[in-house]
Image: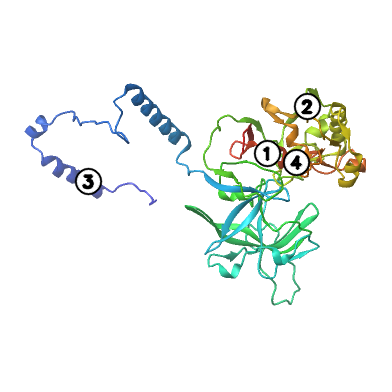
Amino acid sequence: MASSSSPSPSSLLSLFTLFSILFSAFSSEEIENTPLTITLPLTPKFAREPSTDPMVFLHQLASASKSRAHLLKYGKTSSPLKTPLYPMEYGGHTIPLSFGTPPQKLSYLVDTGSTVVWTPCTTHYQCINCTISAKDVPFFEPQLSTSLTNLSCKNPLCNTGCLRCKVKSTNCPKVCAYYLQYGTGAAAGYYLLEDLHFPGKTIHNFIVGCTITGLRESYTDAMAGFGRSMFSLPVQMKVKKFAYCLNSHYFDNTRNSSRLIFDYRDGDTKGLSYTPFLKNPLDWPDYYYLNVKNLKLGNKILPIPSKYLAPGPNATGGLIIDSGFSYGYMAGPVYQIVTNELKKQMSKYRRSHAAEEEIGLGPCYNFTGRKIEIPDLIYHFAGGATMVVPGNRYFKFDTEPTGLGCFPVDTDAAKNLEFTPGPSIILGNYMQVNQYIEYDLKNNRFGFRQQKC
């Protein structure tokens, strides 16, 4: 904007002269005959021909008003993006993603318990102490992409900084390197800036990891972190919320997919019960913590101390939801309370101690020739939201017709520890089957409803 100053006498005289010329162009008669008001026709316009049926016409007006109100309140939004979501035999669920120019499509594990999107990368990819062969792992080939650049270690987005090199080194890498740990597994590589393609939409300069080395991996898919971090898939896509509905969990790589939805719209989703996400402990900033008030088994409220239901100041306790964890987890004291009550309510069935020792899960029961009746596992959340998990969604049944069923939730109960680092309860994807699950990032809340997926 140009600076302003006081006008000079000569400029004021020029301005007065200009106005005099303009007004002299009109005679006094013309001015007297000029109407004081001007009327213009105002004609209603419709996006489509209005119906002659009064009720239909009113519905059209109401729909138009609703759309206008949404536009004024939220502004113009992109349509939701939908992608197929496949259950896998190892217990996870994957989506296809296409990076690069031309696009290279690979399968990515959907993991709300981690935050980085990465892919096995380059012809030099290796997997150490893995149950799979690196030769069987599909990988991204950077040299084939024309839209790729390396994320520099000096870029403010690089949270690891530059690698330490010897003072006289001439080939010190300037890439932004990472080392990520997943339970007993790990991945190491460097970050790229690349194009991510969806039908009708391309996201430029997406930060994706190029993993050169995997450690103790048990599956061949790439990783799509959906956690609470700037590196996660939904955050980089700038969506307001994302949702999924998990179907078949028979560990059979079925191609009967459901859908994962990336939603740029704000507001409530019809039929969902909502509960707020909790503020994360400093040591665990990436998880989705939920405010659980109590758990019930059937009609029995379980006497779980509150220190296990809410995260404490020492970063222990609390419940998180994790799509990348199959059966879920309960800390030893929580597991003991749940399984003790389960044994009471399931006492009419014959225990299979041999199966418990063999697979390390339990309790296990033999249901041969019996009608299977397993109590619901019920989570009561803040705000009145209640998630009911039927017995057939938290018990694991043998795929062979043996009549065997087990409570498969992982635990460290054998260590006899009162607390272990991190959450005390992990709600895994096995308990999320046939639920429409929504992570509302804009409003910091979690929504769900029972639904056949």
Q: Which residue is mark 3?
A: 15
Crowd rating for badge 3 (residues with CA inside 10 Å; few <14, some 14–19, many 20+): few
Amino acid beneath label 3: Leu
Decide which of tag 2 and tag 4 comes sooner along the chain: 4
Q: Residue at x 76, y 55 (%)?
A: 181
Residue type, label 4: Pro
Q: Nearer the viewer, mark 3 or mark 4?
A: 4
Sequence-first tag of 1 and 4: 4
300 left or right of 178 in image: right
Q: Nearer the viewer, residue 145 or 39?
A: 145
Structural distance between the alpha carbons of marks 1 and 4: 28 Å
Q: CA distance from mark 3 to mark 1?
A: 77 Å
Q: Residue 433's mark? A: 1
Q: Is residue 421 above or below residue 53?
A: below
Between the C-alphas of marks 2 and 4, the distance is 26 Å
Q: CA distance from mark 3 to mark 2?
A: 84 Å
Q: Nearer the viewer, residue 230 or 209?
A: 209
Residue 242 sits above or below residue 146 on the image: above
Q: Position of residue 366 (x, y in %)?
A: 85, 36
Residue hosting label 2: 296
Asked if residue 162 can be seen in this view, the reply is: no
